[in-house]
Image (cartoon, rainbow, N blue to C red):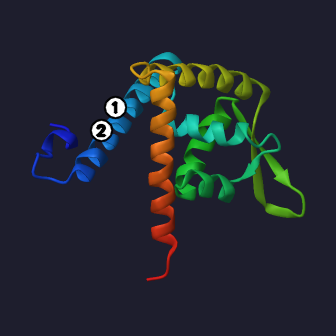
Amino acid sequence: MDLEARAHSEHPDELRLWLRLLTCTQLIEKQVRNGLREQFATTLPRFDLMSQLERAPDGLKMNELSRRMMVTGGNVTGITDQLVTEGLVERVDVANDRRAWRIRLTTRGRKIFNEMAQQHEAWIVEAFAGLNGKEIAQLHKLLGKVKQHSHTTTTEPA
């Protein structure tokens, strides 16, 4: 039973909505994970790391990658080691810092990532195929309001 099914009519609408959002997110993420594994023999964390590097053509330091991905440095190191071995990313010396490396996509890594990114986009578009353009725009706007309200309530002093 998914989280959404556990909520009953006596629960507030807001709770049931949150659980529906969570369920939808989990379903879409599962489809993406399966697709990456089946079509590209890769994982979502590897895709996410390559996505961060694609946005930074000069590369990123390991601590910056870790911060952007919101994972530990050890996780980033393990994924990076795999991708280096496969020739998809490379470590580049950082000027004036012999202890640091900048990680960047190789030409081959950029090509493979672009193929994955196009397919990823298609999976996401398909996930929302049940909605028309107006409904997508409305949902986006409404979720933006939730995000804005959540942001203002979490940044206020206690």
Residue 75 appears in the rendering: yes
- Amino acid on which the number 1 mark rests in the picture: Leu
User: Residue 36, relative to residue 80: is it above or below?
Assistant: above
Report if the CB atoms under discs 1 and 2 are less than 8 Å apart.
yes
Instruction: Choose between 152 and 40: the one closer to the eye.
Output: 152
Instruction: Choose between 68 and 95: the one closer to the eye.
Output: 68
Residue at the (46%, 21%) spot, across then down: 132
Residue at the (67%, 37%) spot, across then down: 84
Residue 23 locus on image (x, y percent): 30, 38
On residue 4, the disc is: none
Residue 141 locus on image (x, y percent): 51, 42
Q: Which residue is mark 2?
A: 23
Q: Is residue 16 left or right of residue 70?
A: left
Q: Is residue 134 left or right of residue 85?
A: left
Instruction: Choose between 24 and 81: the one closer to the eye.
Output: 24
| Cα separation between marks 1 and 2 | 6 Å
Give residue 73's quadrant in the image: bottom right
Residue 11 locus on image (x, y percent): 15, 53
Q: Which residue is mark 1?
A: 27
Q: Are there few (<14), some (14-19), or many (20+) residues within 10 Å of tag 1?
A: few
Give residue 25's quadrant in the image: top left
In terms of secondary structure, where does tag 2 sit? helix
Give residue 50's quadrant in the image: top right
- Amino acid on which the number 2 mark rests in the picture: Thr
